[in-house]
């Protein structure tokens, strides 16, 4: 079972987390073309290798964060809080 | 049965008088096929059976051939027995891994009527017609005969029978963290654990066997001048002296490697104990997170393949000497050794030393010279080099009684049928060693074939686990000890620890057979040629009865990939997963393909390494605890009133409160009528409750709901619907405004967690600029619905708040004391009656329920459950889960007017898609059966009356989502969806079809709000 | 028709009842030789306040307690039986206060009473961490969860907050609805070590 480094709680077993889709996606504006919305809601890349993912520490601090993970080896490179969320000094 | 005080040596004819690591001072009694036998602590079931002269223990999978004990450990392919009686019956258990306990009951399996005379053996006669894969090519026509054929095949094939009663034993899990996990407590593993522990590492040392020490318990070796097991005892003492830092786990098999240093292991705490102590678990699943791991898993010996190689009495050479050395058992009295490499000759030395006759050693290599063969010759044992075992003979009952030896011409494939016969009751076979690298390979490592050592070795690219000793191909004892030490020190350094004083390496006796240098290299003889006339078959996989011929056939039929070979022949698919047969199998495939072994490769290695019982995987999560049950604060009070509970997700909700033996339907009818005519009380604590606060709270609600919230007055509640981003309805609920920046949201029971996640996603990911704080308060509040025309009067008795229609109108919210308890009061109705929802802090929930029941008694207050609640909302036309099934939009649900056009909200954009606003979409309708009596079941399919007699496929124009008997309106009522909705179908008749019952009920389409469509009652 | 006296006066304020009421059997259970490995008490004489500062700067102290900034730590200046402030997430804390203490408040803070929403089990004894390891994948050794550390995690599949008071004292905050299910499994796991359930 993967060990996922929550930016606040440190490494925790995967069972405490849930996956929330790819990171770095901006929600389109209301008046954006339908194609943008379709892409946002329905289309996903399926990278083989390095990926940036949104994960949520649901059974822990309940924070969403970005995880850099290799989808083949499961090696975790890093995790980052979302912009605007701070980690304790 | 208790252990007797004195041993009974006369009853164990094959127990050697001296030696072994068993406790001769205590005798254990056990039964095999009803026969009472004795053994000793330290025995396995296999060693105890052999000690009692029991050599026939099983019948094989396909041909029902008589089978005996082949190995001495977890790789055992043959000695599969059933252990335990009744609910504890466990089939297909390897007798070699069952630690003998007093009172053990074991039985042979897969035979009828008797083990020694099995009718199933007749299948061996038709074996020529049932080669591998025969079932893919036969029994095709006539098809009507297949059920009969299948029944016969089922009886003949398969092994063992399952218990039919629930497992009475308890199992548990244990999470553990360590710096270093060492798998295997043989010489290499002990040195590695010792070195790392001395350097300060927290070490877990696990070994699959009951006693730690690995091969040092099974071989005659001297370390520092003393027997190997004495050195083991000293090392274990030293490890224990290091205190809590070291955890020793005997009888614990590490079964799987998972991501990021996570390992699973199964500890056999009290396996097969017929009378376990209370509170004791039978097995424990360890879930270990290790920063570093050393694999010291040793190697598994390969047998050799020749005609008649499956008879009881044919045994792995290392097992033969293990039975002699560790268990003081003579597996035979006259033994021939068939070895293709020098190391196997140690068996001849050990058997001879135990007083067992060794008439010959047979070796396919020509002109054999070397330290070990020479020592064997020096004992007067003839070595027939350049010869092979061509065939064996024996009886079912007694097993092997002799072997036929032929001369090999130039290393094969031709044999000269010399046909020398040698009397023997034991044939020890030594075909080389396969490093046990399963755990390494589970992580995706690719083992590398070493043509010189004739073994798959670990993948040098992998570099994660430290592999040492036999599993790394290091077989000499002194090298293995040093290898383990190096691995332990390497791991300690990788952990950032200073190595400190290294533990001392013991000196292996110079004349120890373990030190004998290698003479000649091993020869690769994957199968002895078949003699012209043979008694036996040449088995490659003894468990699944796969022969050399089967492999050749599979290749001829085009199954040339090793993965296809496995699945077509079932080679390596048994409980032993081919531990003693996979290498020979793929080597023979390579020969058939005319390619080197690396071109064929291995099949994929998967956890678990050995079979794991489901109980161990479940741990404590069985029965009522399979998932944690959530209870309402009023659970006890409701149980006292006879509530019948049903699960809704994790919650236990009262379904109904039957009186005087009522059926469900009768109780629901009574509850609904009593509520609609008087007053009813229902627990609604299960609904999700979320506290939403902050300066931007109203704006946030605007973004998640389809309707607007900024204009909601303080002290008012409003129904809200949330969508997914794709425009489909996700959840609904009522949200109340307690203050300008403070809202109390409710959700459905099923979606409470999902909605909370959804809100946090919005606040953290989408709109971090909004200042809103959310927290789940589902468990903080107990909540009841008090509903019915008399509900206000009951409430007036319970509170001094002004609850008149003016002071607390429909959808109003207030706070105060109810039944003496601090409460929030909401005038909300799900049933369609005049109704209130009363929330109190959960610790007062029990009091609230009991006090309302008391106050309501003069008014005939009736508790009602989830079923009646559901009936009333269907009668009223409120949508719920079956309508919010993820396929419906607000327009479909008749809530199109709620969709705001003035604000942005989740789902708005994609809701505008043409497909989701198409008026032809199925939309919510009400349905009433024409006969006024037939209940329309949810899930029914709706077709046009004109299609009553149309042959299938019949166009479906809609479906029923929820239906009930409608006691509150006097006739059945249903909600459903029809293409074009009310606009197209109101007033018309359709057919509600129930294909499983074969009925088609005419029903009239009506507006969904059948009960009190103007809402007079809830506004009263 | 019942008499209408002042209805609310008919009822006094009862003590809040515990979710474990029917399931709590005081006494010694399981292994009976030697001192109990686990002694269990339900902490009922406490209030729990969920405090959320949003993205604004939170005050340094609240209700006399320093609000811990380091994740998964708690401040308990008077020891395990005194008040405590437990970190839940960035800007969020759980305050454990005496039941009649005033509601904590500070500018910009959202404060929600969760006193009834959680059941707090206190386990004391040499076998506590071993018993918890039977249902938890965290490192619960004294090194992994030292005194003063807390952790939100899953315990026998139930979401909980663990707070280590000392090497042998751990408080488990469990949502009320899960309390019975957790107690049944936890107490079963503890039997082999000897379980003392305090009244």
Image (cartoon, rainbow, N blue to C red):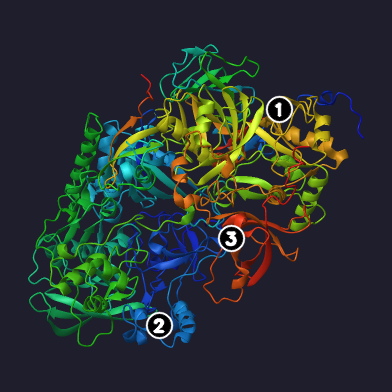
Q: Earlier in the sequence, mark 1 or mark 3?
A: 1
Determine which quarter of the picture holds residue B739.
top right
Q: Could you confirm whether marks 3 and 2 are on the same chain? A: yes
State whether residue C6 appears in this view.
Answer: yes
- Mark 3–mark 2 Cα distance, whole angstroms, equals 57 Å
Q: Which residue is mark 3?
A: B959
Q: Are marks 1 and 3 in contact (CB under 8 Å)?
A: no
| The one of B342 and B39 positioned closer to us in this rendering | B342
Cα separation, mark 1 vs mark 2, equals 78 Å
Q: Are marks 1 and 2 in contact (CB under 8 Å)?
A: no
Q: Which mark is residue B15?
A: none
Q: Which residue is mark 2?
A: B121
Which chain's residue wears label 1? B
The answer to whether B806 is drawn above or below residue B246 in the figure is: above
To which chain does the residue with label 2 belong? B
Q: Residues within 10 Å of mark 2 (few under 14, many from 20)?
A: some
Within 10 Å of disc 3 (Cα), the crowding (few <14, some 14-19, many 20+) is many
Image quadrant assignment for residue B813: top right
Disc number for residue B823: 1
Residue C169 in view (yes/no): no
Mark 1 or mark 2, which has the lower sequence index? 2
Locate residue B334, reporting x and y percent.
Answer: 28, 73
Q: Are marks 1 and 3 on the same chain?
A: yes
- Which corner quadrant holds the C terminus of chain B? top right
Circle 1 crowding by C-alpha within 10 Å: few under 14, some 14–19, many from 20? many
Q: Quadrant of the N terminus of chain B?
A: bottom right
């Amino acid at each position: 079972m993967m060990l996922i480094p929550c930016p606040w709680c440190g490494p925790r077993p995967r069972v405490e987390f849930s996956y929330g889709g790819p990171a770095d996606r901006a929600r389109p504006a209301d008046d954006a073309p339908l194609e943008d919305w379709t892409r946002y809601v329905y289309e996903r890349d399926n990278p083989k290798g390095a990926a940036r993912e949104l994960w949520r520490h649901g059974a822990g601090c309940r924070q969403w964060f970005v995880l850099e993970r290799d989808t083949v080896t499961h090696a975790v490179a890093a995790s980052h809080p979302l912009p605007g969320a701070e980690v304790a000094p | 049965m208790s252990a007797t005080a004195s041993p009974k040596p006369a009853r164990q004819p094959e127990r050697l008088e001296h030696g072994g690591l068993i406790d001769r001072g205590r005798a254990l009694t056990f039964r095999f096929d009803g026969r009472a036998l004795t053994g000793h602590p330290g025995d396995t079931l296999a060693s105890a059976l052999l000690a009692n002269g029991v050599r026939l223990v099983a019948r094989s999978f396909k041909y029902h051939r008589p089978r005996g004990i082949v190995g001495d450990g977890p790789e055992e392919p043959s000695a599969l027995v059933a252990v335990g009686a009744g609910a504890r019956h466990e089939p297909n258990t390897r007798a070699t891994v069952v630690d003998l306990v007093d009172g053990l009951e074991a039985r042979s399996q897969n035979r009828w009527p008797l083990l020694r005379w099995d009718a199933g053996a007749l299948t061996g006669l038709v074996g020529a017609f049932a080669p591998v894969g025969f079932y893919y090519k036969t029994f095709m026509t006539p098809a009507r005969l297949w059920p009969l054929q299948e029944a016969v095949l089922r009886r003949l094939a398969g092994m063992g029978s399952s218990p039919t009663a629930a497992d009475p034993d308890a199992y548990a899990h244990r999470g553990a963290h360590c710096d270093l996990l060492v798998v295997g407590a043989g010489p290499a593993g002990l040195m590695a654990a010792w070195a790392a522990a001395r350097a300060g590492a927290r070490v877990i040392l696990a070994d699959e066997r009951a006693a730690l020490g690995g091969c040092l318990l099974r071989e005659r070796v001297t370390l520092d001048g003393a027997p190997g097991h004495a050195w083991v005892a000293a090392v274990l003492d030293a490890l224990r002296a290091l205190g809590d830092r070291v955890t020793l786990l005997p009888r614990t098999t590490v079964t799987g490697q998972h991501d990021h240093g996570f390992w699973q292991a199964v500890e056999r705490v009290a396996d097969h104990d017929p009378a376990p102590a209370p509170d004791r678990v039978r097995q424990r699943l360890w879930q270990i997170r290790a920063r570093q791991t050393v694999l010291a898993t040793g190697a598994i010996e390969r047998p050799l393949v020749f005609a008649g190689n499956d008879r009881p009495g044919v045994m792995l050479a290392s097992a033969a000497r293990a039975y002699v050395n560790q268990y003081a058992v003579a597996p035979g009295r006259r033994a021939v050794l068939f070895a293709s490499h020098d190391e196997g000759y140690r068996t001849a030395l050990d058997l001879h030393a135990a007083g067992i006759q060794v008439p010959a050693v047979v070796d396919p290599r020509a002109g054999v010279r070397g330290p070990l063969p020479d020592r064997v010759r020096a004992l007067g044992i003839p070595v027939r080099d350049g010869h092979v075992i061509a065939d064996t003979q024996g009886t079912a009952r007694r097993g092997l009684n002799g072997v036929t030896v032929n001369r090999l011409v130039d290393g094969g494939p031709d044999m000269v049928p010399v046909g020398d016969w040698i009397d023997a009751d034991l044939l020890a076979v030594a075909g080389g060693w396969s490093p046990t690298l399963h755990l390494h390979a589970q992580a995706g490592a690719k083992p590398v074939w070493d043509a010189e050592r004739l073994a798959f070795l670990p993948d040098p690219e992998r570099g994660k686990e430290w592999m040492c000793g036999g599993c790394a191909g290091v077989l000499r004892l002194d090298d293995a000890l040093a290898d383990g030490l190096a691995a332990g020190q390497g791991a300690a350094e990788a952990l950032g620890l200073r190595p400190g004083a290294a533990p001392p390496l013991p000196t292996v006796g110079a004349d120890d057979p373990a030190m004998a240098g290698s003479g000649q290299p091993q020869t690769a003889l994957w199968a002895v040629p078949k003699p012209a006339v043979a008694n036996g078959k040449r088995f490659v996989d003894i468990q699944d009865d796969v022969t050399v011929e089967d492999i050749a056939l599979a290749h001829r039929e085009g199954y040339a990939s090793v993965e296809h070979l496995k699945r077509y022949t079932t080679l390596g698919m048994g409980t032993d997963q081919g531990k003693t047969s996979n290498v020979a199998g793929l080597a023979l495939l390579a020969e058939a393909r005319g390619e080197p072994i690396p071109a064929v490769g291995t099949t994929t290695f998967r956890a678990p390494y050995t079979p794991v019982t489901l109980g161990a995987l479940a741990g404590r999560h069985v029965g009522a605890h399979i998932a944690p049950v959530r209870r309402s604060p009023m659970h006890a009070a409701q149980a006292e009133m006879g509530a019948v509970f049903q699960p809704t997700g994790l919650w236990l909700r009262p379904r109904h409160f039957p009186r005087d033996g009522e059926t469900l339907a009768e109780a629901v009818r009574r509850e609904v009528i009593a509520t609609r005519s008087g007053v009813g009380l229902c627990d609604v604590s299960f609904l999700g409750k979320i506290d939403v606060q902050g300066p931007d709270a109203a704006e946030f609600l605007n973004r998640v709901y389809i309707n607007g919230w900024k204009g909601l007055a303080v002290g008012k509640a409003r129904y809200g619907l949330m969508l997914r981003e794709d425009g489909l309805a996700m959840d609904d609920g009522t949200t109340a405004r307690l203050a300008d920046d403070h809202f109390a949201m409710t959700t459905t029971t099923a979606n409470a967690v999902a909605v909370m996640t959804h809100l946090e996603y919005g606040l953290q990911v989408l709109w971090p600029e909004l200042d809103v704080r959310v927290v789940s308060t589902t468990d903080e509040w107990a909540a009841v619905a008090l509903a019915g025309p008399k509900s206000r009067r009951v409430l007036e008795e319970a509170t001094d708040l002004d609850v008149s229609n003016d002071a607390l109108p429909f959808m109003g919210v207030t706070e105060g004391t109810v039944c003496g308890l601090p409460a929030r009061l909401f005038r909300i109705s799900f049933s369609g009656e005049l109704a209130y929802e009363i929330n109190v802090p959960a610790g007062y929930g029990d009091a609230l329920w009991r006090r309302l029941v008391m106050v309501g008694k003069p008014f005939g207050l009736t508790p009602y459950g989830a079923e009646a609640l559901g009936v009333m909302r269907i009668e009223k036309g409120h949508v719920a889960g079956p309508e919010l099934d993820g396929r419906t939009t607000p327009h479909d649900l008749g809530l199109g007017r709620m969709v705001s056009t003035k604000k942005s909200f989740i789902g708005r954009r994609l809701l505008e898609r043409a497909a989701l606003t198409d008026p032809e979409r199925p939309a919510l309708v009400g349905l009433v059966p024409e006969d006024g009596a037939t209940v329309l079941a949810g899930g029914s399919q709706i077709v046009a009356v004109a299609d009553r007699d149309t042959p299938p496929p019949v166009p479906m124009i809609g479906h029923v989502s929820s239906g009930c008997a409608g006691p509150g309106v006097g006739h059945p009522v249903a909600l459903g969806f029809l293409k074009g909705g009310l606009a197209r179908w109101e007033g018309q008749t359709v057919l509600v079809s129930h294909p499983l019952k074969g009925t088609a009920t005419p029903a009239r389409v009506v507006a969904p709000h059948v009960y009190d469509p103007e809402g007079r009652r809830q506004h009263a | 028709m019942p008499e209408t006296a002042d209805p609310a006066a008919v009822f006094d304020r009862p003590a809040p009842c515990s979710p474990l009421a029917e399931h709590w059997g005081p006494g010694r259970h399981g292994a009976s030789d030697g001192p109990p490995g686990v002694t269990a008490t339900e902490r009922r004489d406490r209030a729990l306040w969920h405090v959320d500062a949003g993205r604004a700067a939170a005050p340094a102290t609240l209700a006399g307690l320093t609000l811990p900034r380091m994740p998964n730590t708690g401040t308990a200046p008077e020891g395990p039986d005194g008040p405590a402030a437990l970190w839940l997430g960035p800007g969020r804390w759980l305050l454990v206060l005496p039941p009649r203490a005033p509601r904590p408040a500070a500018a910009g803070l959202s404060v929600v009473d969760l006193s009834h929403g959680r059941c707090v089990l206190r386990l004391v004894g040499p076998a506590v961490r071993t018993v918890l390891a039977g249902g938890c994948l965290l490192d619960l050794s004294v090194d992994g969860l030292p005194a003063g550390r807390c952790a939100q995690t899953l315990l026998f599949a139930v979401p909980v907050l663990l707070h280590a008071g000392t090497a042998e004292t751990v408080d488990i905050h469990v949502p009320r609805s899960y309390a019975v299910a957790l107690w049944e499994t936890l107490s079963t796991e503890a039997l082999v070590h000897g379980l003392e359930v305090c009244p």
